Structure formats: structure tokens, C-alpha cells
Amino acid sequence: MTALTIRLPESVHRAIKELAARDGVSVNQFIASAAAEKMASVMTLDYLRNEAAQGRRADFLAVLDQAPDASPAAGDEPG
């Protein structure tokens, strides 16, 4: 485990303490979870961008061509 000292505006610190208490976790757990969620979000975006960069329009259109030409199901009509 690594210790990290950060400076936060008092209002942010107060809000974190309130939210952590509401969730029944420590401030440390709350901040660690928030950092992990942000990290996962950034890593997911990086992954999706990488995957998109490898995509080929011809492959995409080939998959679309396999979709049946059918009317939307009841309740799915554009509107």
C-alpha cells in the first residue's frame, strides 16, 4: 500500500466525508474507489479507441448487410 498526500479544497473534502459516511465507508476507501473508477473509465476509453482504430469500414458494412430488412417491433418505432 502507498500513502499519498493530496490537497483538496475544504468544500470537496467536506463533500467526500459526507458521501463516504452515507456509503458507510472510510474517506480512504471512498477516494481509493473513486480513483479506481476514474482509472477504469480512462482505460476503457483507451481500449475502445484502440479497437476502433483497427476497425475496417468494409467489415462493418458486411455485418450490416447480414441484418434482416424488417419493420421495427411494436413499441420500437421511431417517433
Image: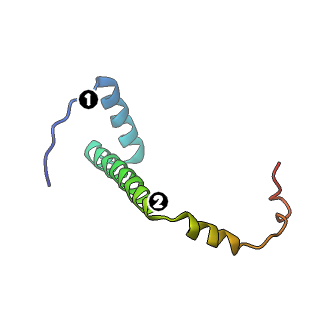
**Does 18 sit above or below residue 59?**
above
Q: Is residue 28 left or right of residue 37?
A: left
Callout 1: SS: loop
Foreground pick, 53 / 28: 53
Q: Amino acid at mark 2?
A: Ala
Query: Which residue lies under the disc numbered 2?
Result: 52
Q: Residue at x 34, y 36 (%)?
A: 16
Q: Residue at x 37, y 32 (%)?
A: 15
**Residue 74 position by quadrant:** bottom right
Q: Is residue 68 left or right of residue 59?
A: right
Query: Which residue lies under the disc numbered 1?
Result: 8
Q: Position of residue 65 (x, y in %)?
A: 69, 71
Foreground pick, 46 / 62: 62
Disc sitting over residue 38 in the figure: none
Q: Position of residue 33 (x, y in %)?
A: 33, 50
Q: Position of residue 24 (x, y in %)?
A: 37, 48
Q: Are marks 1 and 2 in contact (CB under 8 Å)?
A: no
Q: Of the residues under marks 1 and 2, which one precedes in the sequence? A: 1
In the image as oriented, which residue stretches furthest toward the front?
58
Q: Residue at x 14, y 55 (%)?
A: 1
**Residue 64 position by quadrant:** bottom right
**Does 8 sit above or below residue 34?**
above
Q: Is residue 4 left or right of residue 68?
A: left
Foreground pick, 73 / 5: 73
- Eye-nearest disc, 1 or 2: 2
**Does 13 sit above or below residue 49?**
above
Q: Residues within 10 Å of mark 2 (few under 14, many from 20)?
A: few
Q: Residue at x 80, y 70 (%)?
A: 69
Foreground pick, 66 / 77: 66
